[in-house]
Amino acid sequence: MSQIKLISRASRVLSVSGVGVRTEFSGKVLLQLQGNHTSARTMTSSQKKTLTLETMNPNITKLEYAVRGPLVMRASEIEKELEKGAKKPFKQVIKANIGDAHAMGQQPITFIRQVLACVSHPDLLSSDHFPSDVKERAKAILGACGGMSVGSYTMSHGIELIRRHVAEYIERRDGQKANWEDVCLTGGASSGIKSCLQLLCKKVDGKDSGHTQCAHCAHSGTNSAGYDGSNHRHLPPIALTADSNCSLVTVRYYLLLLPMYLSSVLIPIPQYPLYSASLAEYGLGQIGYYLDEDNNWALDVKELERAFQEGSKTHAVRAIVIINPGNPTGQVLTRQNIEDIIKFAHKHSLFLFADEVYQDNVYGEGSKFFSFKKVMRELGAPYESVELASFMSISKGYMGECGLRGGWMELCNLDAGVQANLYKAISAMLCPTTLGQTAVDCVARPPMPGEPSYDLWHKEKTTILQSLSERAKTIADTFNTMKGFNCNVVQGSMYAFPRVDLPPKAIEAAKAVNQHPDVFYAFRLLEETGICVVPGSGFGQRPNTYHFRTTILPQPKQLEEMLEIFKAFQEKFTKEYS
């Protein structure tokens, strides 16, 4: 009988997840595989637990979210160490890992915060310190709340008044009719995306994918985010050992006991880890299509077709995810590209997820945001019938209100019964936060010219977006002056995704400690400089390429300092491993 034992040693722990074999987690865990039986227990506990790694939901153990992964945990530990007076070669941690604008020093929009203040403390409505348009909006929102209080529940899909305002916003943006009943307010875009993904959890045409196969060997589907394809070899059915140089998919095959994916979704590689994490959580399969790094992360429909055809051999491919502007890659799709994608979705009867949360964040010269809904409607029959869910959030754009958890989704062409059941499922979560909905209203119905708040609102908005545009250019230009980096133009969103050429000795050093090379690089960067980024393997990347995602959000002075530190570290790291 074969068995595998993966045992921790000090701070290096070999763990298995849906993204790969990692060593950076702390704790003491023993995993055992004996035939078809997997057991797990903590080595320090003698008490029998109701929930163990073998009795808990296996989909949760596969879930991994790189943006808040081990590097971020270590960054938080370092911050606490600094607070206690620990001596480091730096004075602060720069959290360039996540798109949290306010945490990086961006100031809130006054109009949004004034409306929030008034709905939270209605006595302020009698104050002379607030403009009349602020008080008018606050009164309208309170009037739509039970008991005239934002402390009351709302309808599960949001306050009707605000849903109507969102529909009006969409009509102004697209020049196309929007039905407010197709608008659902959400706790940020993420909750809407996850709710729609759950609709796909059903076997179709008798197809199950079994497991995500290796694109290089089986040519069926593509690798999961995090598998870089390097030094891959297959293992015989009973020859898996802890030191085997096997790929992610091989480990998943053995240790996860062939999970049966009900349906599969086309997602970009690189992708935002919300998608790979949610697909793992729901037991759905993922089929990756590669973005073209050499063409500024463009989306080639031929690559979509390749991924679909290969994936369809074993998967029931039912949906496609498009992130525009791109995260982590920062590209903005052209209108022609969007038309081609819609036609592709129509051809293969795919549900289209349009992640458009960065629609206000467009900087590149000649770049322009087009919503999928607008282009789909303007294409006319038969393409205007594509099933589409588009998502927006108050966490990004010029607002940056991440903590308020507000957003919306617009549903187009869904079967009436499906939409009714989606709303029913959402009702189990009660409702989005009322303050988040209030902030959504401020975005959908901002001050208009001639209103008291307009001039300040317009100044704050344009100042923020102009500064982000300048920082986007600075970060790409500066990385491209450093030896060993290649960074595409940041056309939109809040991130750069530079490629770093790692010396062969650095790659060998990473393998020696069972880390992805880009994870190894990122940990060294964090420990020596205090800069926290997200390794490219957390988003997916082509085999034998290495990247990291950094935000463009540090304020200009801090960004300049960060890039200088990066340059010095890169020179030192390259010299050390040359």
Image (cartoon, rainbow, N blue to C red):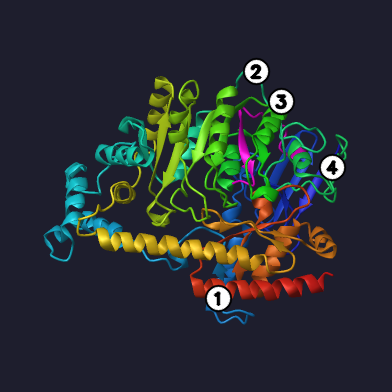
Viewer-side label of 4, 3: 3
Vertical relation: 73 (above or below) 158? below
For the record, the magenta segment spans 254-271
**Residue 72 coordinates in the image, percent (x, y):** 58, 61
- Could you say which is closer to the camera, residue 109 or residue 275? 109
Tell me the tag on residue 206: 2
Residue type of the residue flagged with mark 1: Gln
* Residue picked out by circle 1: 92
Vertical relation: 447 (above or below) 56? below
Left or right, 547 with reference to 233: left
Residue 259 appears in the picture as rendered: no
Q: Assess whether mark 3 and mark 2 are in contact (beta carbons under 8 angstroms).
A: no
Instruction: Indicate which disc, 4 or 1, sits on the residue closer to the N terminus.
Output: 1
Q: Assess whether mark 1 and mark 3 are in contact (beta carbons under 8 angstroms).
A: no
Q: Which residue: 33% across, 41% down?
A: 172
Q: Is residue 256 magenta?
A: yes
Query: The residue tagged with tag 2: helix, strand or loop?
Result: loop
**Residue 332 coordinates in the image, percent (x, y):** 54, 47
* Residue picked out by circle 3: 314
Viewer-side label of 4, 1: 1
Badge 3 crowding class, 10 Å Cα cut-off, few under 14, some 14 to 19, many 20 or more, is some
Left or right, 127 with reference to 68: left
* Residue picked out by circle 4: 240
Residue type of the residue flagged with mark 4: Leu
